Amino acid sequence: MNWLQATQIFRPRLLDSLHGYNRQKLGQDIGAGITVGIVALPLAMAFAIASGLKPEAGLFTAIIAGFLISALGGSKVQIGGPAGAFIVIVYGILERYGLANLILATAMSGVVLFLMGLFRLGSLIRFIPVAVVIGFTNGIAVLIMLSQVKDFLGLKVTAMPADFFGMLNALASNLGSTNLAALLVALGSLSLLVGWMRLGRRLLETRYQWVSTIPGSIIALLFATLASMALSLPVETIGSKFGGIPATLPSFHWPAFSWDSARFLIMPTLTLALLGAIESLLCARIADSMVDDRHNPNQELMAQGVANFVTPFFGGMPATGTIARTVTNIKSGGTSPVSGMVHALTLLAVVLVAAPLAGNIPLAALAAILMFVAWNMGEWREFMLLRQYRTPYRITLLAVFFLTVVFDLTVAVEVGLVAACLTFIYRISSLSRSEAVSPVEHPSLAAHGANIQAWRLYGALFFGAVKLIEEIEDQLSTPLLVVDLKNVIYVDSSGADALMNLIHTCRKKQVQLIVCGLMHQPLDIARRSGLLKHLEGQLESDLPAGLARAVSQANAMDR
C-alpha cells in the first residue's frame, strides 16, 4: 500500500477543512470552541462522578478524547467527550470488575471501534432499528435520573448499587437521611436550568439573543456554588468528597490488571464499542443536517477508536460524539474541527488555572444538571406515539426499554436486535408471494389447463420465504411447470437450494420444468451455486416465451 492509498483509508476531515481556511473562520472557531469548552466543563465532571469516577476523569476525557476526535474524525463540527449514555455501563463495569479492568475494557473498545472503521463498517450502524435506539436511550435516561437521586436529596448512601432494584432498595432505605439544604440547592439549580432555557428561547428573536448563548449549566453551577459558600450550607462538594481537582496535566498510567480478566470483558467491551459507534454516528448525522454537510462514518469510527484507546491510560473514561455540545458548537459558529480542538484546549486551561475553585461545587447542583440532561436526552414523546405503530415495533421498543432499566444494556441491545431481525424476516417473507398465472391473462393456457401449471413469484426468495417453492412442489399435478422469476429481486443460498429441490422433484415426477426471467442477482447466485448447470435447456427470457414453449410441448404430447 502506497502513501496515497493510506491517506484515502485514513483521512481526517481536518485536512479537507483547512483548504480555503482564513482568519474569519479561525475567529469563529475560537469563539465557538471557548463556548463549547465552558458548556463541557460541568457536564464532564458530572458524567465522571455519576459513573463512579473522580471528576478529573471526565475533564481529562474531554481534553484528550475531545482533541483527538476533532483532529482525526470524519465530521467537521462534531464534539467528542464523555457522554451520559456511558454512565450506566461504566458504573456497572467499575463495580463488577474494578478500575483497572475498566481501563482495559475502554482501550479494547477503542481497538474494536478502529477496526470497525478500518473495515468500512460505519454505514452498518445505520441499520440498527430506531425502536432499539429509542428504547435503550430512554432506558439509560431513566437510570441516570435514578442514579442522581442520591446526590439530589443529599442521602447518606455508602455505596450505590449498579442494578435497578439495588438502587431502589438503597434509596428507599436511606430516605430518612435526606439533606434539606442539598435538596434546596438541587431544586434551585434545576429551576434555574429550566428557567434559563425558556428565557433563551424568548430572547432568540430580540437584540438580547446573545444571552441564549450562555450555558444554563454554568449559570446554575455558579449560583449554586456562591449560595452554598455564602450561606455555609452543609452540603457535600467536590472538595469534601474527592479532595478537589488536581491542577496538573494528565499523566500516563499503566494499570495493574490481569490478562485473565480480559475474557470476562468481551461483552462490556462490545457494548462500549457499539454504544459509542451508535452515539457518535447519530450525533454526526444530526450535525450534517444542521450544516448541510456529510460526514465520513468510517473515519469517525477510527478517530473514536484512537481516542478511546489512548484516553483511559491518562486517567480518562469512554468517549463518543456528544449531541448537546455539537449543537452548541454549530450554533456558536463553529466551521471546522479546529473549534473542537479549541474546546479541548479551553478545558485544559481551566484545569490548570481554575481547578482549585471547583472544590466548592455542590454535588447536588451537578445532580440537578444531570437530571436535566437525562430528561432532554430521552425521547419521551415516542411512548405517546406508540399506538400509531405496529405491534412488533411497540414490543421491540418497550422490551429494550424495560431490559435496559431492569436488567442490563447489553442484554437489552442483544434482545432488541434479535427481535428487530425476526420482525424484519417476517415482514420480508410476508411481502414475498406467489400467484398462479391466469388463463384470462394468457389465453394460451385455457386449452392446456390439464397439462400446464404456471406460477409467478414476487419479492425475495430467501430462507424465510422458501415455503413458496415448497407449496409449488406440493401442487405438482401436470406434466409441464412454468415458473416466472422476473419479479424476484433477491435469492439467497436457501432459495437456491429450494429451487434445486424443485428441479429434483420435477425430474422424479417426470415434470418438465421451464424457468423464466432469471436475471440480475438471482442469475448471479444461480451461476455461483451451480443451479444454472441443472437448468440448461430449461430457461426462457420471459413468461410469454416460457408459456409458448410449454404450449408447444403440450401440443406434442397430445399428438
Image (cartoon, rainbow, N blue to C red):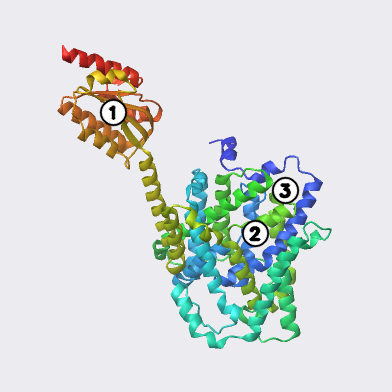
- Point out which mark residue 324 bears: 2
Q: Position of residue 228 (x, y in %)?
A: 71, 82
| Residue 384 shown left or right of residue 437 in the figure | right
Task: Tell me if mark 1 has few (under 14), some (14-19) or many (20+) residues whose alpha carbon lies within 10 angstroms of its own.
Answer: some
Determine whether the residue tagged by mark 3 lies in a helix, strand or loop.
loop
Mark 1 vs 2: CB contact within 8 A: no
Mark 1 secondary-structure assignment: helix
| Residue identified by numbered label 3 | 335
Which residue is located at x 56 percent, y 50 percent?
281
The residue mark sitting in front, 2 or 3, is 2
Residue 325: image location, x then y, percent: 66, 58
Query: How many residues crowd around disc 2 within 10 Å: few (fewer than 14), some, or many (20 or more)?
Result: some
Q: Amino acid at mark 3?
A: Thr
In the image: residue 402, left or right of residue 352: left
Separation of marks 1 and 2 at Cα, in angstroms: 54 Å
Residue position marked by numbered label 1 in the rendering? 531
Does 515 appear above or below 282?
A: above
Foreground residue, 466 or 343? 466
SS state under label 2: helix
User: Label 2 amino acid?
Assistant: Ala
Sequence-first tag of 2 and 3: 2
The percent position of residue 179, horizontal first and vertical second, equals 61, 86
Of residue 72 and residue 519, the one placed in the foreground of this image is: 519
In the rendered image, the quadrant that contains the C terminus is top left
Residue 121 visible? yes
Above or below, comparing residue 545 to residue 294 in the picture: above
Spatial CA distance of label 3 from label 1 is 55 Å
